[in-house]
Image (cartoon, rainbow, N blue to C red):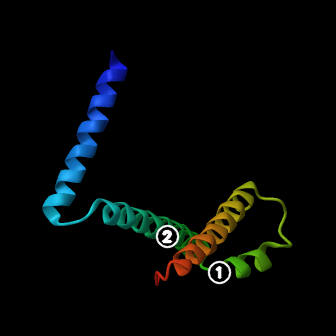
Amino acid sequence: MTKKTITITNKSKNLKIHNLAKVLGIKRDELEEQYTVYSLINKIEKFRNEIQFFENKYNKSFSEFIQSNSTLPENYEYEDDINDWEYAITNLEYYRKLAISISLNV
């Protein structure tokens, strides 16, 4: 019974979105394209913000942080931050390349 309610709700939500798009004069394929571009931009901003967080936290770029902490004793917080920071940098580069591939300037 719950499954039917969810299905009806999802169909109803999709119908409302497509009706809204119609009112705004946006075609269905344009709506999907705009959503995809928005999602890509959102990912880029997410990873930019994460990188900015670490740069502000340590008042250094990633490479400066790695160089200045390479001789310090093991520190789990630093190691976690290095992993998260590096992940953000890698993903930012990946999503920027995707953006460039569709001629999106971000």
64 vs 19, nearest the viewer:
19
Disc number placed over residue 61 in the picture, else none: 1
Horizontal relation, residue 69 to residue 17: left or right: right
User: Number of labelled discs?
Assistant: 2
Local secondary structure at mark 1: loop
Residue at figure coordinates x 50%, y 70% from the top left: 44
On the image, the x and y values in percent for residue 93 come to: 62, 75
Residue at figure coordinates x 62%, y 73% from the top left: 58
In the image, farthest residue toward the left: 23
Vertical order, 66 against 43 (above or below): below
Local secondary structure at mark 2: helix
Say which quadrant the N terminus sits in: top left
Dot 1 alpha-carbon crowd within 10 angstroms: few under 14, some 14 to 19, many 20 or more: few
Q: Marks 1 and 2, how far apart in space? A: 13 Å
Question: Which circle's residue, 1 or 2, is located before the other in the chain?
Answer: 2
Q: In which quadrant of the rendered view does residue 36 lie?
A: bottom left
Front label number (1 vs 2):
2
Residue annotated with mark 2: 49
Residue at figure coordinates x 71%, y 76% from the top left: 65
On the image, the x and y values in percent for residue 106 come to: 47, 81
Horizontal relation, residue 25 to residue 60: left or right: left
2 vs 63, nearest the viewer:
2
Disc number placed over residue 19 in the picture, else none: none
On the image, the x and y values in percent for residue 18 come to: 23, 52
Mark 1 belongs to which amino acid?
Ser
Mark 2 belongs to which amino acid?
Asn
Residue at figure coordinates x 49%, y 83% from the top left: 103
Dot 2 alpha-carbon crowd within 10 angstroms: few under 14, some 14 to 19, many 20 or more: few
